[in-house]
Amino acid sequence: MPSITISSGSVHYSEYGQGEPLVLLHANPGDSLDFEAVIPALSKNYRVLALDWPGYGESTKPERPELATVLFFYDVLREFLAELALPSAFFIGNSIGGNVAARLASESPELVRGLVLVSPGGFTPHNVMSRSFCKIQGSRFSISPHRFASMYLKRRTSTAKAMLQRASTIQATNACITLNRSMWRSFSRPESDLRELALNIKAPALLLFGKHDLAVSANKDGKVAAKSMPSAEFVVLPCGHASFAEAPELFLTEVEPFLQNCSNA
């Protein structure tokens, strides 16, 4: 499997197909395998690159995982794109991956051809309860990765079951949990808030939220995202946090025509 070396260490990615580049960005925790149910279809028409964030999958863990933030992952993505010298690309980002992709589209529109944001973080109108939850998840009292994933993955496909298995094993190591907690601590900080930044996004965008997602609410976060990105398409699917894994056929029904329209524009 290919990898590149950037300032944070070695970043692993998988590559499939040929054509315009399509970058897949997973959640926290997670890895590039989360997208395995939809990669075969997507790679028929695109050069698909699915990366592992530092500390997950086969990528090197951050030197100081306890200090990692959303902006750290954003810097990793920028270095990754620069190292591969990718032309303007499509991005599919889930949760924190969606947050990072949206920030890229806002700050560097020349790098983004189109966006598919799957239950993206950064659109939560924080209150005392949400900040308290982020604080707990960022502490030694956090819910385990497996237990939390079992709450937001509502349709147990083979891919979702594999995600749960990884959440209970390789994503449950001390290093991964330290990284996971650090990211949670950053979620309630201003650096994670996309509500103003998203107003600057000019690239075509598709917002996909899960009707039964307990982590990122379609009814609350989804509506805020749609308001911050008024030109984006907004779709709610009957699943949880990861539609590409829980309902891959429905996901592709929405995503493939969207990408094709972007390519033809």
Image (spheres, rainbow, N blue to C red):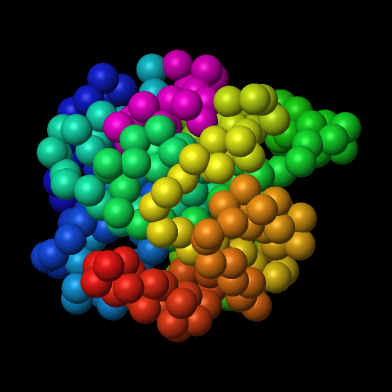
Q: Residue at x 76, y 41 (%)?
A: 125
Return the residue nearer the eye: 194 or 211: 194
Please state, as top left, top right, bottom left or bottom right, where the C terminus lies in the image. bottom left
Residue 86, compared with residue 119, is above or below; it is: above
Residue 66, position as x, y percentages in the image = 54, 20
Residue 23, position as x, y percentages in the image = 30, 53
Q: Residue at x 50, y 35 (%)?
A: 176
Left or right: 106, with 188 as reference point = left
Q: Residue at x 27, y 41 (%)?
A: 110
- 77 in magenta: yes
Residue 146, position as x, y percentages in the image = 62, 52
Can the viewer see residue 90 in this picture? yes
Can the viewer see residue 59 in this picture? no
Residue at the farthest right position: 128
Residue 128, compared with residue 58, is above or below; it is: above
- 145 in magenta: no
Left or right: 218, with 118 as reference point = right
Q: Residue at x 31, y 66 (%)?
A: 262
Return the residue nearer the eye: 98 or 6: 98
Residue 105, position as x, y percentages in the image = 40, 43
Q: How many marks are shown on the rendered structure?
A: 0
Return the residue nearer the eye: 129 or 177: 129
> Where, by quadrant of the figure, is residue 170 drawn?
top left
Report the magenta stretch's main SS: helix
Return the residue nearer the eye: 162 or 77: 77
Q: Which residues are magenta?
A: 64-78
